[in-house]
Amino acid sequence: MLNTFNPLAIIKRNLVLGLFLISGVLFAQDPIGSETVTVVKPYSPSVRDASKIRETPTRADSVNTAKKPVQYSIFSVPVASTFTPAKGRATTVERERPPKVFDNYATLGFGNYSNVLAEFYSNLEVNRTDNFGIFLNHNSSQGGIEGVRLDDHFYDTELNLSYTRRDRELSWKTEVGGQHQLFNWYGLPENPALSNDQVMDIDPTQNYFSVYAGGEIDLYDSFFDKAKAKFRHSGDSYGSSENHFDAKGTFEVNIAGELITSDITADIVNGQFEEAALDGTAQDYTFMNFGFSPSLLVLRDDLTLNLGIGLFFSLDPENSDNNFYLYPQITGSYRLSDLLTAYAGIEGDLEQNTYYDFYQKNPYVSPGLAIQPTETEYDAYVGAKGRLTTFLGYNARAGYASQFNKALFRRNPTGPLASIENYGYGNSFQVVYDDVNTFSFFGELNVDVNRNFHLSLNAEYLGYSTDEEAEAWNLPNVKASLNADYQITEKWYAGGNIFFRGERQDLAIIDNTQVDGSLLEEIVTLDAYFDLNAHLGYRFNEQLSAFVRGNNLLNNDYERWTNFQVQGLQVLAGATYKFDF
């Protein structure tokens, strides 16, 4: 196709181009005026993320070879075998056979001074919940202490019968028993005024009798927790008679997670002596004591706090007197660490003394004793206990106690005014009362090396201050003891203990020795003493064992009470047999 020339079209195109260039020049030549620029935001340059190289680059192989599957086969050939694997057997742990517990045992032993020891215990199972128990104990000696002018033999026999029942909701026990004790007032002072004939006329024998009955009950799911009561009738060969009833009940109530415990007590004693005291005063007595002791137990992590008070009412019908007592009963402990637990307390109580309690502590008392209650106004103490190592434990305590009418044993007078009775030659003891303050410090160590060896050591220092009496009669200022038990082998066992008592003071009173007829008094100091005892035993089998016991092995000729020497070296051998019916 041929192109034709068109002059008109060329002119139009050139005209448009020229107008565009002229307008551009005109606009470019406008004058520039001054302007204000306001920076709204400061310039803060940033670096944009650059393209990162991939850790695992994309594979771009020019040749991609595919894996070839591997085909294989097993050529199995049977092989004859006579091997048979052994069956597995569980490993067993050898357990130690627990010792068999027998329901009955009998012990019999003989020693020098004609000492005899006999014990019998039997627990008869009536049915699955009920048991009947029998316990008989006898300890006697025919005496023979060197230098003693009067008969010094003794014996102590007790029989106890009990019946026990245990159910799911409660358990209870009843018991009855009797006891017969014989002692001699053989502690005559050195008195040249007594001839041999006068000494032969003295009958120093004293017999004590007592029978008792009691019971106790424990309830497992009740606010009434437990209760116990006991009645005992006591007497002697001089016509003394005493009836003592003691009962206690405990109630527990849990309020808002706190345990409130209340103890209700009743202590009633009545007695009379046919023999008046050596001073001629009558000694019939009756006391009725009732107590109520509520307490709140607070447990907070390592803190244990028992906040309580004791309220007591005491009635003395013989003297038409009655008194009301209020005592603090507050104890607490705080566990500072595994090695140390601190504890403290302040407690008061009203203790009713009885004739039976007195002749159990000192069998050489005379009839016609003064019987009164002892009031512990407060007994304050602070201490610490814990374990120094896994096998060494300790306990240390310091205390101060204030007591009113504390009972003290003091020797009876010596002389013709008192010699009308067999116990009136300075060979017996009376009871006097005084207000006594006692400061004490106690320490104890317990060592448990293993299951076969145990050792304990304790010591106590006591300081007394009295109100009317010159001394705290017959109370030691130092007491200490050491006890050890050692299971030597499976069959052999041994043990021992050492007792130490510090000096004590007593009062010697001699009648009609002064010109004016007054009494001559002299304070006597009893020496401190050690008493070493040990035993050794051998078990032939589970039922039969033999033992040897030695008492006062140091053969010390010491006086437990004034003029009452103890037996020297004592050796006793015997056997114990356990059995079932």
Image (cartoon, helix red, strand yellow):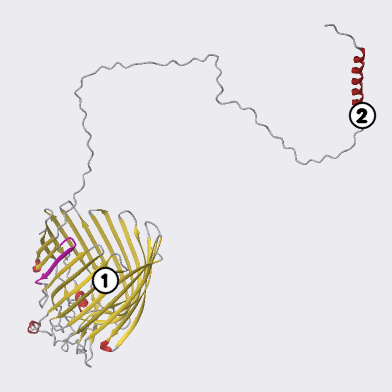
In this view of the protein, which residue sits in the foreground, 512 or 382?
382
Q: From the viewer's perspective, is 346 left or right of 150?
A: right
Estimate how packed mark 2 is, as few (under 14), some (14 to 19) or many (20 or more) residues with alpha carbons within 10 Å: few
The amino acid on which the numbered mark 2 sits, given as a three-letter code, is Gln
Where is the C terminus found, in terms of image quarters?
A: bottom left
Magenta span: 127-143
Q: Where in the figure is residue 113, as x and y percent of width and height?
A: 9, 69
- Residue that lies at the very extreme toward the top in this rendered image: 2
Estimate how packed mark 1 is, as few (under 14), some (14 to 19) or many (20 or more) residues with alpha carbons within 10 Å: some
The amino acid on which the numbered mark 1 sits, given as a three-letter code, is Ala
Sequence-wise, which precedes: disc 2 or disc 1?
2
Q: Where in the figure is residue 575, as x and y percent of width and height?
A: 10, 60
Q: Where in the figure is residue 69, as x and y percent of width and height?
A: 42, 16
In this view of the protein, which residue sits in the foreground, 489 or 247?
247
Q: Secondary structure at mark 2?
A: loop
Where is the N terminus found, in terms of image quarters?
A: top right
Q: Secondary structure at mark 1?
A: strand
Q: CA distance from mark 2 to mark 1?
A: 125 Å
Label 2: which residue?
29
In the rendered view, tell whether residue 77 sits above or below residue 217.
above
Label 1: which residue?
227
**What residue sits 24% from the left and 82% below the top?**
371
In this view of the protein, which residue sits in the foreground, 576 or 398?
576
In the rendered view, tell whether residue 189 sits above or below residue 499.
below
